Amino acid sequence: MKSILYTLLLFAITVNAQTATKEQIISELPEIEITEGINLHIISPEPIQYVDLSTAQLTGDLPTTNIARIKITDEQKSDEKVKKVNHSAFLDRDKIGIITVMGQSFIAQYKAVYRNSENLNTVTNIHIQAEAMQPIEFDKMIFSNLELRKFAVDIIQKKSENNPIRQEKDFNLSFQLNNVYVISDYIFLDMTFKNNSNLSYDIEALKFSIEDKKIHKATNNQSIEMMPLFQLNPQKHFKKNFRNIYVFKKFTYPNSKVMMIRLIEEQLSGRTIEMKVNYSDILKADTF
């Protein structure tokens, strides 16, 4: 256990030590080819925060959080100055533009070069490779979704479902908190849902909130909803068993309050089950 934690901390320190982004010059940028009338999809291993296209010859959008879609600007949409020159001159092989993609923990830059549409080997998508990524320097240790996923997968591989910290049973359902883990400023909740009925379960919502332990009057109840930063599986349906990891930024709450977790079924006559988690359970969080 300690050796694993030491390895993770050493990795984090190494990453932080290498976050000074070196200077980049255009001639050293990796090239990607782009063709008129064909979209180029740049696929990132983590959510894209920002994309810059250095010239009007390129246009694009973000159809999903991990994909940047880029194409050569249509001739009729180029500005008036460009319209006065031949379109082939507009598509200067060496000056078509620089594409910059910024993820949560890296920046990647490419030099876009023109490829004739008659060539049948046109590339339509590329994955950002590790060698193209330059780490971004942060003031605090911040993990990207890709890193959080790696940690969550490590937790899933542990055999920790037999002795849960908390467990609730109702409607032939079993809802358990297997364990709580912490690394840096992140809290990982390892949870398992078991359905002992023959009726499959459609999840409408899994809600997390901080609430008063004792409610003297309904109007005095203060509920603060909490949203996970990341969850390993976005699954909304399960027949028998479903295990998932939910990640939160570090939080605290007094002994007079509890974390309330509610599993809510989709149908009108849905089966709802609740679990109360004391702060002492969070304080006993394990490392990994």
Image (cartoon, helix red, strand yellow):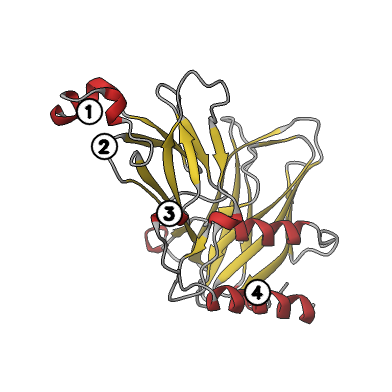
Upstream in sequence: badge 2 or badge 1: 2
Q: Amino acid at mark 1?
A: Ser
Number of marks present in the image shown: 4
Q: Quadrant of residue 260?
A: bottom right
Q: Which mark, residue 78? A: 1
The residues tagged by marks 3 and 2 sit, at their Cα atoms, a distance apart of 20 Å
Closer to the camera in the image, 196 or 218 = 196
Upstream in sequence: badge 4 or badge 2: 4
Closer to the camera in the image, 244 or 272 = 244
Foreground: disc 3 or disc 4 = 3
Using residue 132 as the reference point, say whether residue 201 is left or right of it.
right
The residues tagged by marks 3 and 4 sit, at their Cα atoms, a distance apart of 31 Å
12 w.r.t. 268: above or below: below
Q: Amino acid at mark 2?
A: Ala
Foreground: disc 4 or disc 1 = 1
Q: Residue 20: where, in percent of width, then height?
A: 46, 73
Foreground: disc 4 or disc 2 = 2
Q: Amino acid at mark 4?
A: Phe
In this orientation, does residue 192 appear? yes
- According to the picture, the residue beneath numbered tag 4 turns out to be 11
The residues tagged by marks 4 and 1 sit, at their Cα atoms, a distance apart of 47 Å
Q: Residue furthest top?
A: 118
